[in-house]
Image (cartoon, grey):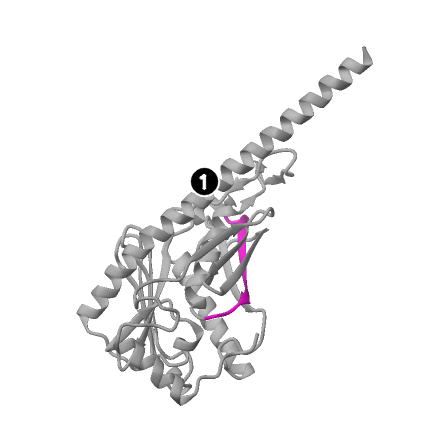
Amino acid sequence: MASKVIGKCEEKFIIRCLRDRQRLDHRLPFVTRDIKIEFREEYGSAVVSLGLTKVLAQTCCKIVKPKETRPNEGRLRLQLKNSHNMVFNFETGRQTQWTTLMSRHLLQNIRDSGCVDMESLCILAYEHVWEISVNLHVVDYDGNILDCANLAALCALAHFRYPAVTVTGTDVHVHSLTERNPQPIRILHYPIMISFALFENGEYMLIDACEAEEKVMEGLFAIGMNQHKELSTLAMFGEISEEKVMEGLFAIGMNQHKELSTLAMFGEICLTRDQIENCISLAHNLVRDITKEMRTHNLVRDITKEMRSTLEKNREEQLQMIQAINHR
């Protein structure tokens, strides 16, 4: 999938539409595209679509030695991988750097916000912990990869199950899926990320920009706060404004309780306090809707899986009864 090229005429047309509160796909400025969540059969595998943008998240785990500074906490890794070239219209080296930067902020939004109970991933303090790795693959791209990848990572973590273990002294026995049911990751809340594209030095902004709108926006800003509403991160990167690509993204990471988890700003745009508070209020309304939709999908998936397991169990019992009757 080749990256779109925006000419001067189309750029002026997009800006004119913004002034009239209109967009290329007929959405209002603060309306997101349709979100579709698909859980696959494999644990920890989910596909999230945000409009035409689609991200596949795959989760795996392994037993590793914990960090010396956190001996009783597990580890969480997250990596964003581009499945096709020229996603952001960058040169090869710059594209890799941008992907790494986005992976870092996604990990910060999920791990540093206290989303996952890291202590529950500890097997034996100072010796063995679970390391959870989430790989995000961009399947299709049409803007706003940050929000889509963040949602895909959360869905994959909620869907993932890791093997049960038994600790006897210093010996660790990992049970197979047939011996004991695998355990879900304990997720305390869902830090949803909402992105605001900024135009005309912050005078105009919109939510969930498509690829064409991203080619025109100007500056990236991000914020972070933990679950106790304590500000954890404030980052500004001005060099990206010289690239003239992906320069205008205002990203807010927060959970449904209106607690911020991530704040970062890239570019040279300055926002007033009223603008930031307005963005937070808009993001909170969207976060509640998205979180409700995620939990609904998780519930439907769990019920469907339980019904399937019950049907298979009943089928096995019926076969055993038939075999017993035939032997008579």
Report whether residue 77 is seen. yes
Q: Position of residue 279 (x, y in %)?
A: 26, 65
* Residue situated furthest right in the rendering: 327
Q: Position of residue 174 (x, y in %)?
A: 62, 40
Choose top left, top right, bottom left or bottom right for residue 192.
bottom left
Q: Position of residue 33 (x, y in %)?
A: 40, 62
Is residue 85 toward the left or the right of residue 52 in the image? right
Q: Which residues make up the magenta segment?
A: 125-142
* Residue situated furthest left in the rendering: 274
- Quarter of the image with the C terminus in it: top right
Q: Position of residue 23 (x, y in %)?
A: 34, 72
- Quarter of the image with the N terminus in it: bottom right
Instruction: Pick whichever, 182 or 175, lies toward us.
Output: 182
Q: Could you tell me what secondary structure mostly forms the magenta stretch?
A: strand
Instruction: Pick whichever, 153 or 62, lies toward us.
Output: 153
Asked if the stretch drawn in magenta spans residue 135, the answer is yes
Q: Which residue is mark 1?
A: 299
Choose top left, top right, bottom left or bottom right for residue 234.
bottom left
